Amino acid sequence: MLLIWDFDGVICDSDGIWADNWEKLLLSEKNISLTPKERRDLLIGISEKDKAKRLEQHFPHLTIDDTFKQKLNTLHDYGMKHLLVLTEGIEEIFKDARFKQCIATGGTKYQNDTKNHTTGIDKYFNTNNCFTADMVANGKPAPDIFLLAAKKMQTPANKCIVIEDSLDGIKGGKSAGMKVFAYIGAQANHNPQYIQQCLTSGADNIFNNMQDLHSALIAELNR
């Protein structure tokens, strides 16, 4: 069995860090403030490229130019190197040799490598089992990154479990023909409304802590 991990919102409760950076710059550079719903819909659980695309579509006069991107990358770089904390209990799953494991993230290779190093999980994840948004044509909710991960890890889709927090990620995993376990322990996701949205998006099961998730994964392995 192959576990396919998302990073932000699952391995680390970090979606809020990147969303805060976007909001800070949108206000200071473009005089745009976001509602909580806009923050959720436009900035959580998708790649940086898709965030820019959604924002420009949502605000017709907005252009995410190179200067904005450079300032954003500086803020993100600080966050990646200094602010990340592993989700409690997750390393016990990483250590479980009964599973093949990989990462499929909306970040770039540089971002993923940096985050893995900061959190100390580069002893589990390296170039052989990390798959990033810049490796595929279409980001989540397209299934591309999950299909790539399964192919490279030599595992059929029906033997993969995607562990995701975002609705786009859940939809992408299901489109790839995989089981999807939704993790909602991140601060932005832990509420009844989001649980229902995860179910509507196709999640096979939902967890708010890694201990229960680990038990469920072992049960799946023993089926």
Image (cartoon, rainbow, N blue to C red):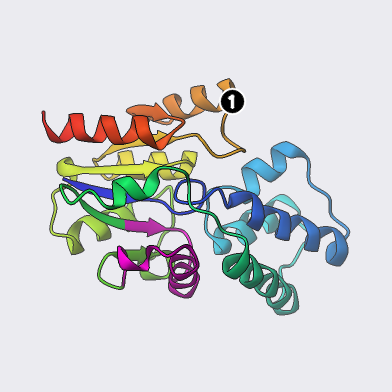
| Count of all numbered marks drawn on residues in the image | 1
The residue positioned 45% from the left and 67% from the top of the image is 112
Above-or-below relation of 10 to 215: below
The location of residue 46, given as percent across then percent down, is 53, 53
Which quadrant of the view contains residue 175? Answer: top left
Q: In the depicted view, which residue is nearer to us: 179 or 89?
A: 89
What residue sits right under mark 1 in the picture? 191
Which quadrant of the view contains residue 70? Answer: bottom right
Above-or-below relation of 177 to 142: above
Q: Classify the position of the C terminus by image quarter.
A: top left
Q: Classify the position of the N terminus by image quarter.
A: top left
Q: Residue type at mark 1?
A: Asn
Q: Does residue 204 belong to the magenta stretch?
A: no
The location of residue 38, given as percent across then percent down, is 71, 42
The residue positioned 18% from the left and 48% from the top of the image is 99
Q: Label 1 neighbourhood size at 10 Å, few (<14), some (14-19), many (20+)?
A: few
Q: Which region is colored magenta?
A: 103-126
**In the displayed structure image, the side of residue 14 where residue 153 appears, left or right:** left
Q: In the depicted view, which residue is nearer to us: 168 or 182?
A: 182
Q: In the depicted view, which residue is nearer to us: 82 or 61?
A: 82
**In the displayed structure image, the side of residue 20 where residue 46 appears, left or right:** left
Q: In the depicted view, which residue is nearer to us: 189 or 42?
A: 189
**SS state under label 1:** loop
The residue positioned 40% from the left and 39% from the top of the image is 170
The location of residue 142, given as percent across then percent down, is 39, 50
